[in-house]
Amino acid sequence: MAAGLASTLPGAALVCVAAGYALAAAWLSRRKPAPRGAMSATPVSVLKPLCGAEPRLYANLATFCRQRHPCFQLVFGVRAADDPAIAVVQRLRRDFPACDIALVIDPRVHGSNLKASNLINLSGAARHDALVIADSDVAVAPDYLARVTAPLVQAGVGVVTCLYRGHAIGGFWSRLGAQFIDDWFVPAVRIAHAGGSRRFAFGATIALRRDALAAIGGFEAVRDRLADDFWLGELTRRLGLRTVLSEVVVTTDITEDGFTLLWRHELRWMRTIASLNPAGYAFSFVTFTWPMLALGMWLAPLPLVTAAAAVGVMARSVLAGSAAAALRAPLRDGLLLACWALALAGKRVWWREQVLPVGDRQHSGAATESSPNSARFTGIHTERPL
């Protein structure tokens, strides 16, 4: 009897927690969208670090050129004079001649995070006090800038950020990758936000004022941090400023059309999350609905437990959003569990041909301007429209 209870109680508890989480995630994801917030006409500079000719790069960047905003500037930055992204920026200039577009070509490396180095190099070309940083693979609606910058006029706001949906570019594996975002990451953020947490900031969008950026030490403060987006928010929060989650939702491309590429990408995400919140990450296994329900029913094969698991399966199917995605959900959740477990053991990730440690290091001295490794980087070339 005691041996039976030793497995039955944990199994029943696991099913109840996993099913309850799936219900909460499905409800928050499917409820009516938040009403549109205020609009802002504050002049804004958008900083876009680029690296290479990504799929759909022109289409994504063009959505920023089509903004219904009275005064905005787009500042693109690359490290190499032969970067294919330069041709895309030049095409944007031809196709959107009324758009204020600056291109910064600067090879200097300021730290181990090359994206942060790029931001340091291009930030000097920004002319406005309101700044928006957005990843290169993000697409936005025409009212995006007016809406995400509106909260910056409120006293005490440090960073405005927004959630994003996965846009699969390719076949089965890219669709599975989009579910990582839509079925797991976004619901987890919504639940944390509903519970009062504001400890996040996402590279899909970070809007902040120039004075707030200067107060944390500029982009130099994140030059040696892998999770630069998170730390831009965290450092402003440490100044007593609030992080606002905008009602705006953008899309981000998922291009990994193969298991190895997708696994490497998701492992980087998982290890980064684990490094930022080890305790929360350790208990996040309850969010992997299908394997947790299966394990719980195996430990506690009781009618009530089976009924609770059925509720969890239905909620998980609603969260998936379509019949095809619901059919992929068991595999999606199983891969999440495997990636979660492997991420607990490792300390390095792949990021754009680099192998980096997940532990964020502040001013590590790796590849800084004064280091021998960067002595050859001396030129700066800034292009502006005449």
Image (tube, rainbow, N blue to C red):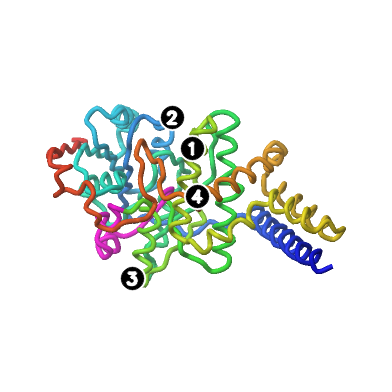
Look at 37% across and 55% down and name the residue there: 359
State if disc 1 and disc 2 touch (CB < 8 Å).
yes
Three-letter amino acid code at the position of disc 4 = Ala
Mark 3 Cα-neighbour bin, 10 Å: few <14, some 14–19, many ≥20? few
- Residue 272: x and y in percent read 44, 52
On the rendered image, what quadrant is the N terminus found in?
Answer: bottom right
- Count of marks overlaid on the render: 4
- Please name the residue that numbered disc 2 is placed on: 55
On the rendered image, what quadrant is the C terminus found in?
Answer: top left
Q: At numbered mark 2, what does the secondary structure look like: helix, strand or loop? A: loop
Residue 99 colored in magenta in the image = no
Whole-Å distance between the Cαs marked 2 and 1? Answer: 8 Å
Three-letter amino acid code at the position of disc 3 = Leu
- Residue 80: x and y in percent read 23, 33
The numbered mark at residue 343 is 4
Q: At numbered mark 4, what does the secondary structure look like: helix, strand or loop? A: helix
Three-letter amino acid code at the position of disc 1 = Asp
Which residues are drawn in magenta? 203-224
The numbered mark at residue 253 is 1
Q: Earlier in the sequence, mark 2 or mark 1?
A: 2
- Please name the residue that numbered disc 3 is placed on: 239
Whole-Å distance between the Cαs marked 3 and 1? Answer: 33 Å
Q: Nearer the viewer, mark 4 or mark 2?
A: 4
The answer to whether residue 331 is left or right of residue 82 is: right
